[in-house]
């Protein structure tokens, strides 16, 4: 038997060490419960049995919400039982209510390492050896097993950019949008900017086009991606705002507006640049 603990009771004081820190080593499932809660008493033994059966592969942590209101409030617990899975210090999945055992098993299986994870590890090892061809093959295999996996998409897109294949990189990154970019948002967006800039053509050529025709909206959008790719975010947003102002009732203006929203994700909601250009965009659209 594995000597690693499969379950434990936690408190506000021990949550950081026993859940957040531990989740960097293995999956931690937190059961938010209370003694008076009937569904909690039903689901508790099911989770405990599954954790024992897993023999340390993942850990069950039980938190009494009545005795530990700080953590319960921090994670917005309004109904119990609430079960949250933590990985690398963050919630990666959750459910509320007493689900049947078979459904909980399927929920756990989706969270635990599988064949795609093994392919990603092989890809990482190949990158360490600087074997791009082997790494690319493993990333492709991981995507075939688990379509939309963020790590595989980002890894493969990076290799495509290195191989001067920006269009394939952009296709991959676009496929990730429906997944909300998850925890790889910053990296994915940065790569997206690089890919778009590579497709657009040389920056000097775009500036020449604009000098000859300042109303060339396509050139302005392309130039904005170049500027954003080298972190000239304000200049990029200014270019895009101009296209929105001139074309806000046609598809070109919508492309520019969506591009601004992508750059806002990079600059962050609290950035002065984001605040300034969100306001400018609203004034342009609704004046």
Image (cartoon, rainbow, N blue to C red):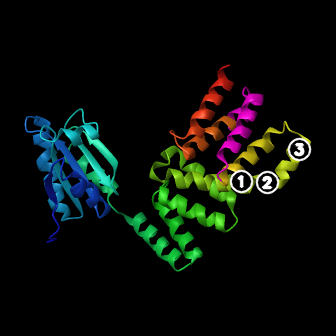
> Image height check: is 125 above or below 45?
below
* Residues marked 2 and 1 touching at CB (< 8 Å): yes
Which secondary structure type mostly characterizes the magenta part of the structure?
Answer: helix
Which label belongs to residue 211? Answer: 3
- Side (left or right) of 28 relative to 113: left
Q: Give the labeled residue for mark 1.
A: 197
The structure residue drawn at horizontal position 53% and vertical position 52%, both measured from the top left corner, is 186
Lower sequence index among marks 1 and 3: 1
Q: Where is residue 210 in the image (x, y as percent from the top left)?
A: 85, 43
Q: Position of residue 245 (x, y in %)?
A: 74, 29
The structure residue drawn at horizontal position 56% and vertical position 78%, both measured from the top left corner, is 130
Quarter of the figure with the C terminus: top right
Q: Where is residue 72 in the image (x, y as percent from the top left)?
A: 22, 39
Is any atom of residue 144 visible in this view? no
Which label belongs to residue 8? Answer: none
Q: Identify the image quadrant of residue 203.
A: bottom right
Q: Verify whether residue 164 appears in magenta.
A: no
- Side (left or right) of 103 relative to 280: left
Furthest residue toward left: 35
Segment colored magenta? 231-255
Lower sequence index among marks 3 and 2: 2
Nearest the camera: 54 or 56? 56
Q: Verify whether residue 232 appears in magenta.
A: yes
Give the number of marks: 3
Q: Which of marks 1 and 3 is in front?
A: 3
Q: Give the labeled residue for mark 2.
A: 203
> Image height check: is 149 above or below 66?
below
Q: What element carries label 1?
A: helix
The structure residue drawn at horizontal position 22% and vertical position 49%, both measured from the top left corner, is 30
């Amino acid at each position: 038997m594995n000597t690693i603990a499969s379950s434990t009771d936690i408190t506000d004081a021990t949550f950081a060490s026993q859940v957040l820190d531990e989740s960097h080593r293995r999956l931690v499932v937190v059961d938010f419960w209370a003694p008076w809660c009937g569904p909690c008493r039903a689901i508790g033994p099911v989770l405990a049995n599954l954790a024992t059966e897993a023999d340390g592969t993942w850990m069950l942590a039980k938190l009494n919400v009545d005795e530990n209101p700080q953590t319960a409030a921090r994670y917005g617990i309004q109904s119990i039982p609430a079960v949250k899975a933590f990985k690398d210090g963050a919630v990666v999945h959750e459910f509320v209510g007493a689900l049947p055992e078979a459904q909980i098993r399927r929920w756990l299986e989706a969270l635990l390492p599988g064949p795609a994870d093994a392919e990603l590890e092989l890809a990482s090892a190949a990158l360490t050896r600087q074997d791009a061809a082997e790494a690319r093959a493993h990333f492709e295999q991981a995507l075939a097993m688990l379509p939309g996996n963020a790590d595989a998409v980002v890894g493969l897109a990076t290799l495509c950019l290195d191989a001067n294949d920006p269009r394939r990189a952009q296709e991959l990154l676009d496929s990730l949008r429906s997944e909300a970019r998850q925890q790889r948002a910053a990296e994915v967006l940065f790569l997206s900017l690089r890919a778009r800039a590579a497709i657009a053509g040389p920056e000097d050529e775009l500036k020449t086009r604009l000098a000859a025709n300042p109303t060339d909206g396509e050139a302005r959008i392309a130039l904005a991606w170049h500027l954003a790719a080298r972190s000239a975010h304000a200049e990029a947003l200014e270019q895009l705002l101009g296209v929105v102002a001139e074309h806000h009732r046609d598809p070109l203006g919508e492309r520019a507006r969506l591009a601004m929203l992508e750059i806002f994700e990079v600059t962050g909601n609290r950035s002065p640049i984001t605040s300034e250009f969100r306001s400018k965009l609203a004034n342009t659209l609704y004046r």
